[in-house]
Image (spheres, helix red, strand yellow):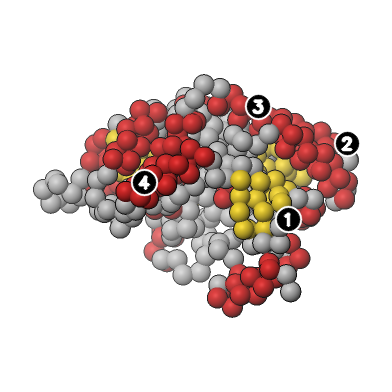
């Protein structure tokens, strides 16, 4: 029995599904990652992969970046957790507030799910309203509201509030409104009917890999302002990835609150809610007790090791040429994958923005909503991903590919070359 097979056998006994989340592979492709360096990971049997999983996005600087490693080692020697203010948390907060257009202040959490949950709590506290408007196919984490009508490309098309997990609070079906992404008229209709009850509009400005059509985000901003609704951008994926100021800088629309995770922790658990000071101030526990006080906190909130790692990551990302490089790598990979598909006779569209993308197999050339994504050839996309994994490229079957600053031009060209064979195999 190989080292990896032994570890997988142990995992099956101790961890249901032998998986840490929803990332799973067929039995013959299952991996236990032993190490990572730069753009590459190595499994327990010594096989190397060019990594486009990147821990589902946080590793914008790749694995074991020397500046992050040094920052973590330094802080670990000073202390790992204090449950109190600490220098790295303060310095990282200042950096984020300085970078993000909507940010006048921020509060930390530990995961992206916690950040989106907390943002909704602040919106309800500020407005005294209950309803949340979210978009079909939008993903905002694992909490109950986020798991309403969140699946994409699953063949489930509904403008109703559909639970995507067992065990959700039943009352939420009456408190979440679902509308299609990129359909401003549908949002207007929903706001016209129940605007006085809506506390928040929560949106991924880049929904999975769907770009907002011109005027869509601007329309959300106008509707939220006119109707006293808190506009929340979920920038867990897009924050510090699409631009220094995230999607709100790239698309030129400023929300009231924005949620961050992934990149701001440099590979360590950390998230934040940034935005208007009056909204963040509702979580200030030094204020006299009031009906609008909103509890936010946690044992590891603002953890100094995570904050030190995040600060080191952002210090690298802030350097000249960073985002030009990330956009160039993403553009080359998208163009190369589409060309490889055409040459193999497979209708490939590599959607996304900058260094986040997904190669979709679809005849429909106008993919704008989650319902459009439900028409893609998911089975062939998954088969293509399995072919790529066999060739030494790690990615989520049917999902997004993340590109890091340390992926080389050679990595990209090798990926495109392998994709030609993989598309031919699923033709």
Alpha carbons under labels 4 and 3: distance apart = 34 Å
Q: Which disc number belongs to residue 328?
A: 3
Query: Could you say which disc has been placed on residue 168 in the image?
Result: none
> Mark 1: which secondary structure?
loop
Q: Residue at x 47, y 27 (%)?
A: 318
**Spatial CA span between label 2 and label 4:** 51 Å
Task: Give the image quarter of residue 332.
Answer: top right
Please tell me in which quadrant of the rendered image residue 63 appears: top right
Task: Tell me the number on the disc at residue 75.
Answer: 4
| In this view, 84 is above or below 352 | below
Residue at numbered disc 1: 47
Residues packed near mark 2 inside 10 Å, few (<14), some (14 to 19) or many (20 plus):
few
Q: State the image coordinates of residue 3 (x, y, percent, origin top left).
A: 68, 68
| Residue 145: % across, % down | 43, 56
Mark nearer the viewer, 4 or 3: 4
**Residue found at x 61% / y 42%:** 38
Question: What residue lies at 62% left-to-right and 58% top-to-bottom?
Answer: 34
Q: Are marks 3 and 2 in contact (CB under 8 Å)?
A: no
- Cα separation, mark 1 vs mark 2, equals 29 Å
Q: Look at the numbered disc 2 and give the secondary structure of its residue.
A: helix
Q: Nearer the viewer, residue 367 or 63?
A: 63
Q: CA distance from mark 3 to mark 1?
A: 28 Å
Does residue 128 appear in the picture of this structure?
no
> Label 2, on which residue?
343
Instruction: Please name the residue shown 14% across and 45% down the image.
Output: 287
Residue found at the very far top of the displayed protein: 320
Q: Position of residue 184 (x, y in %)?
A: 52, 35
Q: Who comes first in sequence, dot 1 or dot 4?
A: 1
């Amino acid at each position: 029995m190989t080292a990896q097979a032994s570890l997988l056998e142990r995992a099956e006994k101790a961890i249901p599904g032998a998986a840490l989340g929803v990332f799973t592979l067929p039995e013959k492709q299952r991996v236990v990652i032993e190490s990572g360096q730069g753009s590459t990971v190595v499994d327990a049997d010594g096989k190397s992969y060019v990594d486009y999983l990147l821990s589902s996005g946080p590793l914008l600087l790749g694995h074991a970046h020397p500046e992050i490693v040094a920052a973590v080692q330094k802080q670990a020697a000073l202390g790992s957790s204090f449950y109190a203010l600490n220098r790295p948390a303060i310095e990282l907060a200042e950096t984020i507030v300085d970078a993000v257009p909507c940010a006048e202040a921020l509060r930390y959490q530990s995961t992206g799910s916690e950040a989106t949950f907390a943002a909704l709590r602040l919106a309800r506290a500020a407005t005294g309203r209950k309803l949340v408007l979210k978009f079909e196919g939008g993903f905002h984490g694992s909490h109950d509201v986020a798991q309403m009508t969140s699946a994409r490309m699953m063949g489930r098309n509904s403008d109703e509030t559909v639970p995507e997990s067992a065990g959700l609070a039943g009352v939420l079906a009456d408190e979440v409104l679902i509308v299609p992404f990129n359909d401003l008229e549908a949002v207007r209709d929903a706001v016209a009917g129940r605007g006085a009850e809506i506390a928040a509009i929560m949106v991924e400005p880049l929904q999975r890999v769907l770009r907002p059509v011109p005027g869509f985000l601007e329309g959300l901003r106008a509707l939220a302002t006119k109707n006293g609704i808190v506009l929340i951008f979920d920038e867990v994926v897009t924050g510090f990835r699409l631009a220094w100021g995230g999607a709100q800088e790239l698309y030129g629309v400023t929300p009231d609150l924005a949620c961050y995770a992934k990149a701001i922790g440099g590979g360590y658990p950390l998230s934040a809610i940034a935005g208007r000071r009056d909204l963040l101030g509702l979580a200030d526990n030094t204020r006299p007790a009031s009906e609008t006080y909103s509890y936010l906190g946690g044992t590891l909130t603002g953890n100094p090791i995570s904050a030190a790692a995040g600060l080191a990551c952002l210090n690298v990302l802030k350097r000249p040429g960073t985002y030009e490089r990330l956009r160039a790598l993403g553009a080359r990979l998208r163009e190369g994958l589409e060309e490889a598909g055409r040459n193999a006779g497979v209708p490939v569209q590599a959607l996304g923005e900058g260094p986040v993308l997904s190669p979709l197999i679809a005849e429909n050339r106008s993919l704008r909503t989650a319902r459009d994504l439900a028409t893609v050839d998911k089975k062939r996309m998954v088969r293509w991903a399995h072919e790529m994994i066999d060739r030494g490229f790690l990615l989520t079957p049917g999902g997004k590919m993340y590109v890091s600053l340390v992926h080389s031009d050679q990595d990209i060209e090798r990926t495109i070359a392998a994709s030609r064979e993989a598309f031919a195999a699923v033709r």
